[in-house]
Every structure is written in C-alpha cells, then in structure tokens.
Image (tube, rainbow, N blue to C red):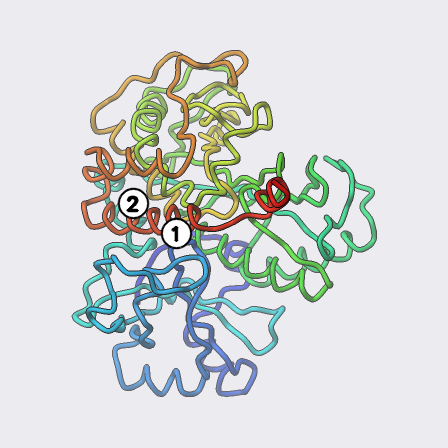
Amino acid sequence: MTTTTTSTTPDELLGYISPDQLRTAVKHGDIRTVLLVVPDMLGRLKGKRAAGLALFERLDEGNGIRVGEACSYILATNADMEPPDGFGLTSWDDGFRDMVINADWDSLRVLPYMPGTALIHCDAVDYDGAPIEVASRQMLRRQLERLDALGFEARVGWESEFVLYSGDRPVVDRNIDYDLDHPPRLTDFLSHLEDALPEAGVPVEAFKTEGAPGQVEATFPKCDVIRACDRYTVFKHIVKHLSRRHGLSATFMAAPATGLTSGLHLNLSLWQEGRPIFALSSPRSLPTEIMGHSIAGLVAAVPHLMPLFAGNANAYKRYAIPRNFTPRFMDWGPDNRGCAIRVAGHGPSSRLEIRLAGADANPYLVAAASLAAIAQGLTEKLTPPPPCLGDAYAADSFEPLPGDLSEALKAFRFGNVARDLLSTPVVTHYGRAAQVEIDEQRREVTDVERRRFHLA
C-alpha cells in the first residue's frame, strides 16, 4: 500500500477508514460501492463505481494495490472528454490503450452524502508498475521527493471560491461579503455542506460569502500536500453534488462572468524536523533566508509554468481585471492581496499565499509547479527582488503575467525552465493540452460575438 501522509491527528482522520474497516463494512452491506477515482488533467475525479464485494475478491487474488484498469485517455483529453490527437501517452495510433490504477489506501474515505459509498484516490501506472510521469498526482510526488532531498517538508492549505446559481442567476443578487444574514436557501445549502464535508474526510476551517453575487469562499486547514490536494478534489465533488440536491448549480470557473473571478489560493509553508521555518513575528517582517529563497524561486520560475496554473483561455480573464484581488504581475509583497505571492500570517502560521490559480485549476499541478519553483530557489539560493509595498497593480517593475494562454504556452513550451524543473515529457504533454484548448477557442463562436455582431 502506498503512503502519502506524515503525522496525523484523530480529527484529521475523521471520515477516513482503513482497508480492514472497508472489508467489514462491505461484508455487512454498509458499503456497497467504492468509487475508484483518478484526477484528470483538469483535476476532476474520473473513474469507476466498483462493487465492494467484487473489489475485495480481486484484491484477494492480487497484491492489495492494483484495483482496476481504465482508458489512459483520462490523462489526455479535453474538458469535454473528447480524445484529441497529438498526445504521446495515448492516441488512435495505439488504440487508446488501458492503464492500471493502483489504490492509495491512505486516501480511503466514506461519502456520507452518498449512502453506502466509499471513495479512494488511485495512481496511474503502466502494466509493468512504472508510474505514468504525466499523471498530476505523480508529478506532485516527484516534487515532494525533490524537496525532501533538500531536507524540507511542505504543508499547504487551500482557499477556494465558487459561485452558486439558481437557474441562470446567482443565488444571491447583491454583495454580501462577510455577511452572516444569508437567504434561507443559501443557509440550507451551507449547513448541509458543513455537515457532509468533515464526515467525508474534508475538514474546512471556515466559509464566508464574497463580494460577488452568489460567491462563496472556503478555507481549508494545512496538512501534507497530497492529502490537501485529494481533499480539494473531493470538496469540489461534494459541492457540485449537494448543490444539485438543493436545486442549485455550482461553478468553479476562473471567470464565470465578465468582471467576476474565482481564485484558488495555495497557502504554503516549509517545515524542518517538525518545526516551521517561515516563522515571522508579523507578515511585515523581513522574510527568513529560506522564505526569501522560496519567494525568489517562485518569481523566477512561475512565469514559465503558467499553463499548470491557468490551463484554459477563460483562466486568463482573471488577470485582465484591475484591482479585483487577482494579480497582474509576478510580484510579491507583505500582506498585499494584490500580489501574486503574499507573505501572510505570523509565528507558526507564517506562509506564502500563492494567488495565481483560478478555482478550476488542477490542485496537484498548482502544487507541483509551486514546489518545483521553490526547490529551484532553494537549490540556487536565489535572492528575491524588492517587495511590492504599495499598489500591486502599478508594480510594473515586475514581469507581467501572460495575457492569454498562447503567450503562456510559448514560455512553457519553448524555454528551458519548465523542461529543467518538470521534464520534457511533462512539457510536451501539457503543452499539447494547452494547444488543444487554444485551437478550440479560436474556432468557437461565442455568445458575445453573436450579441455584438449578428446585425453587422
């Protein structure tokens, strides 16, 4: 069985069960179905509904890890689950071959909002057992191993926004930022969500309504990186499932409407021998040496890795709106929400808040790219540029973020940074995914075009 976690507390294990507990629950009929899930390139959970009894019969005949097969196009497709050409992993040339999915038993959890159902994250491997290099979970593992070789451990916590709709209108039609007097329909949904999440092994520190109509933010506690990413993918599954039960719909689009953006912020700290090494007396203090190297690595490398933070055309619309708490430059600053990297917290909670990704981003890719950049900063002992101490939207001494996916793809595909940090197969694979998105965007006629030009 694979192991992805470090130390845990009883509260952190709420909702998780062991394989032996699952076997007992299946035997007694308490669990009938096990969702075998693999994150696709967008971070969505894809997989199969396995019958509990059949699953254990198969495991008893094998090695306790291999739980099934799936078409490898799960890792080489677009948002519509179409099979584009041009991927080395799989294509019509090889008949869209299968891959093996191995259970990560540390991720096994019950889903109380789906009675009789458990869920387990799986890793994609070849039939010889070799990990598939371009699978996002494997990419993250490689960067964690690299960080471990440098003597560091990362802990992360996500902040995510989403928008709730009733029909084609937001469930709330006005700004209710930080409000506690919510309409009954929203209160009922949030109460149901707050009950379901911890019982499914997805603890949340807090919810708050945001400034945009119908927008909600969730804040998650820090934990080890793979577990944090697993939790976020389950969180999105729960939000979408429960919203439909309440007659609503939820979107995690980076820019669901003109002028509206939803972000996915990565709060990251480094630890050594059980101690936080980013600890500052206040977020306005000078960064520690290790924090400084980390910031410098991010500032230097992330502009070359943007397709992993923003992998579709819509995601770049977040960066086009001034003064909306979304970065426009690859800058950093103490407690500055306009920067791409915000130094936040104090004492043991000191952290880097990496504010680049939209809520629709694949969390494993965001974390892998961030850790790759940080590891480069630590290895080369890079020095960060001076911080942004004022208006981050006027910080034109920093490199601007790409204006669109085409611009981001050029830096990713044709420079050396991404290849050096992530490998040529990864750049080739995700470069092709970005090109598929660009080609689709170029030929798609949008509602805006029809509205503006249909009488021209």
Which of the two residues, 447 or 340, is positioned nearer the viewer here?
A: 447
**Residue at x 83%, y 53% (from the top left corner):** 184
Q: Is residue 149 left or right of residue 175?
A: left
Instruction: Using the rendered view, name the quadrant where residue 417 is placed.
Output: top left
Q: Which residue is mark 2?
A: 144
**Residue type highlighted by circle 2:** Leu
**Residue at x 73%, y 57% (from the top left corner):** 167
Q: Element type at marker 1?
A: helix
Compute the Cα span from label 2 to label 1.
9 Å
Residue most extreme to the front = 456
Task: Say if 67 sits above or below 147 in the image.
Answer: below
Q: Would residue 219 be visible to someone looking at this image?
A: no
Q: Element type at marker 2?
A: helix
Which of the two residues, 401 or 373, is positioned nearer the viewer here?
A: 401
Q: Would residue 171 be visible to someone looking at this image?
A: yes
Find out whether the residues at labels 2 and 1 contact each other: C-beta distance under 8 Å: yes
Image coords of residue 13 (percent x, y): 50, 59
Which circle's residue, 2 or 1, is located before the other in the chain?
Answer: 2
**Residue at x 45%, y 33% (from the top left corner):** 354
Q: Which residue is mark 1?
A: 226
Task: Locate the C terminus and report the quarter of the image it occupies.
Answer: top right
Q: Is residue 141 left or right of residue 402?
A: left
